[in-house]
Image: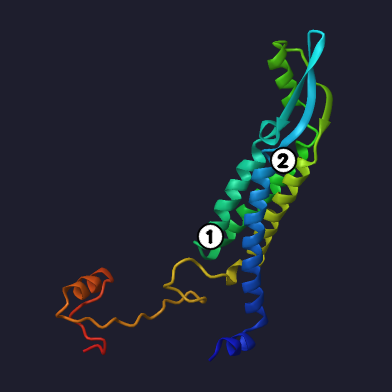
Amino acid sequence: MSGSEAEATESPAGRAGRRSVAVALLCGALGATVVLLASGRVWARGSAAVGDGSLPLAADGRAVTGLPAALAIVGLAALVAVFAVRGKGRLLVSGLLALSGLGAALAAVAGADDREALDAEAARTTADTAAQVMGLSHTAWPYVTASGAVLILLAGLLALRFGRAWPAMGGRYERDGSPRTRKPVAVDPDRPEDLWKALDRGEDPTRRPDGA
């Protein structure tokens, strides 16, 4: 059967499963990248009074909260692990992937109007524990971070919905989980390297391919 004939006879569920794999991988990888990059950008700006003047201050996302970046790394690990496990294990890892995205999104939104990081920076800069940041303003980067986290969440939801039909790592299994039959490779008994290769594959070099 040719490739075009195989696609024509493939069930709608099979096609949806293949598409969902690609979409989940794209969403998970892109989302984690956005979170890691955006959380390193400046989230808040302000100034601290120093003598007769003021000192500009800035805080990046990781100074405000390190949770989105940490959960993005967890999400990446879970995205890879989805293809390394089967059954209930895959369901649990898919849930972890979704929760990583959800937690990163909530943490980013919660830190969008945070002032504690700059207050701490103002106190450190002025050596005054009571000092507070002045002229506080926030950037859009927390919401960019949250949008990346939503992509991770989407990858997790796709894994929960379609993950049962996704292939697993390793070439020894078909899509239905049954072992593939491997045709023995012909071994030339006069070639020592063929004998060693057969032993490395776990085959009996004295056994003929026809089973004799």
Q: Who's the residue at 26% across and 86% down the image?
A: 209
Name the mark nearer the viewer: 1 or 2.
Answer: 2
> In this picture, is 112 found above or below 10?
above
**Image coordinates for residue 10, horizontal then vertical, percent:** 62, 84
Q: Mark 2 = which residue?
A: 107
Farthest residue toward the right?
135
Residue depicted at 59% across the width and 90% down the height: 5
| Circle on res. 89 | 1
Q: Residue at the front extreme?
A: 53
Q: Which mark is residue 170?
A: none
- Dot 2: few (<14), some (14–19), or many (≥20) neighbours within 10 Å? many
Horizontal arrangement in the rendering, residue 204 relative to residue 153 (left or right):
left
Extreme left residue here? 190
Instruction: Report if the CB atoms under discs 1 and 2 are less than 8 Å apart.
Output: no
**Nearer to us in this view, 46 or 120:** 46
Q: Return the x and y of residue 46 as percentages of the image width and height.
A: 80, 25
Coloring applied to the structure:
rainbow
Q: Nearer the viewer, residue 45 or 32?
A: 45
> Residue 154 in the image: x percent, y percent?
70, 58
Q: Left of 149 or right of it: where is 164? A: left
Local secondary structure at mark 2:
helix
Residue type of the residue flagged with mark 1: Gly
**Residue 9 x/y as whole percent:** 62, 88
Asked if 205 appears above or below 69 in the picture, the reply is: below
- Residue occupying image coordinates x 72% and y 45%: 145
Q: CA distance from mark 1 to mark 2?
A: 27 Å
Q: Look at the image and tell me in which quarter the C terminus lies.
A: bottom left
Instruction: Look at the picture and state if 3 lies above or below 23.
Output: below
Q: Earlier in the sequence, mark 1 or mark 2?
A: 1
Please name the residue shown 64% across and 83% down the image: 11
Name the amino acid, label 2.
Answer: Ala
